[in-house]
Image (cartoon, rainbow, N blue to C red):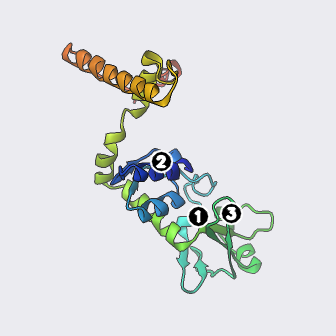
């Protein structure tokens, strides 16, 4: 996530600002979305799934089940209870503001669906989420990921891992054979040219890209 800033800053310094920056889930974050938008760059990629147990349980209440009322500085739970604490603070690693809310003990402990909401020893549900600008950027990214045009745009990134693997395994792009940036850059351009020629030759010979490799263990799974 943190390398996006370096990549985009260096591209802009070279007058190579991209309109769209395609990344995988490991590079996408709320901060990255906001910062990219400020630079006029559309950061496109899938968001990582939440690691909370609520998001992985069918009938549980994750953050999406709560209604955030930014102006009133409060959150309403699925059962209609309103949070009693709203605290804003800056995250130490990003310096960006974040919000933490808490519901009253009496409301949570007497709730009939408490087991679907929290497993805290105190029995009280707390929520944490980023500031409004970042939160809304993440929401738009999630909505976008479910649309057909997202998959059409993200298709351009398909095969990048395979290209990197081929460059490393067959053309040795991670090892510099010469000293000096100019010579190393020439080596990389030569490797890229060779890779394109090899792929074009294979295509003309009738060879087509293989499907995703399935492990021996996965092949044991019965077909439905």
Image position, residue 197 (x, y; %): 27, 19
Q: Nearer the viewer, residue 157 or 41?
A: 41
Residue 61 is tagged as 1
Badge 2: few (under 14), some or many (20 or more) residues near its Cα, within 10 Å?
few
Q: Earlier in the sequence, mark 2 or mark 1?
A: 2
Disc 1 secondary structure class: loop
Disc 3 secondary structure class: helix
Camera-side mark, 2 or 3: 2
Residue 7 is tagged as 2
Q: Nearer the viewer, residue 58 or 217?
A: 217
Which image quarter: residue 199? top left
Camera-side mark, 3 or 1: 1
Image position, residue 111 (x, y; %): 68, 74
Q: Earlier in the sequence, mark 2 or mark 3?
A: 2
Kindly report the distance in space between the C-alpha atoms of the residues bearing marks 2 and 3.
Answer: 45 Å
Determine whether label 3 and label 1 are within 8 Å by CB: no
Residue at 39% across / 61% down in the picture?
143
Image position, residue 7 (x, y; %): 47, 47
Kindly report the distance in space between the C-alpha atoms of the residues bearing marks 3 and 1.
Answer: 10 Å
Residue 193's place in the image compared with 155, above or below, is above
Residue at 59% across / 60% down in the picture?
60
Task: Identify the residue at the far top of this view.
Answer: 205
Badge 1: few (under 14), some or many (20 or more) residues near its Cα, within 10 Å?
many
Q: Earlier in the sequence, mark 3 or mark 1?
A: 1
Task: Identify the residue at the far right of this view.
Answer: 121
Residue at 21% across / 13% down in the picture?
205
Residue 115 is tagged as 3
Camera-side mark, 2 or 1: 2
Disc 2 secondary structure class: helix
Badge 3: few (under 14), some or many (20 or more) residues near its Cα, within 10 Å?
some
């Amino acid at each position: 996530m943190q390398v996006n800033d370096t990549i985009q800053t260096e591209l802009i310094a070279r007058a190579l600002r991209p309109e769209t920056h395609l990344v995988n889930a490991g590079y996408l974050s709320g901060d990255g979305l906001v910062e990219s938008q400020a630079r006029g760059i559309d950061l496109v990629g899938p968001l990582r799934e939440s690691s909370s147990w609520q998001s992985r349980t069918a009938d549980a209440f994750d953050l999406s089940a709560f209604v955030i009322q930014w102006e009133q500085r409060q959150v309403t739970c699925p059962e209609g209870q309103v949070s009693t604490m709203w605290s804003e603070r800056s995250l130490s690693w990003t310096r960006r503001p974040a919000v933490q809310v808490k519901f009253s003990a009496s409301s949570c402990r007497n709730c009939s669906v408490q087991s679907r909401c929290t497993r805290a020893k105190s029995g009280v549900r707390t929520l944490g989420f980023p500031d409004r600008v970042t939160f809304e950027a993440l929401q738009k990214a999630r909505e976008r990921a479910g649309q057909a045009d997202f998959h059409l745009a993200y298709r351009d990134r398909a095969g990048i891992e395979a290209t990197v693997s081929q460059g490393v395994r067959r053309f040795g792009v991670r090892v510099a054979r010469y000293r000096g940036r100019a010579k190393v850059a020439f080596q990389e351009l030569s490797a890229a040219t060779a890779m394109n020629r090899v792929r074009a030759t294979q295509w003309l010979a009738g060879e087509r890209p293989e499907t995703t490799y399935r492990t021996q263990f996965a092949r044991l799974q019965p077909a439905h």
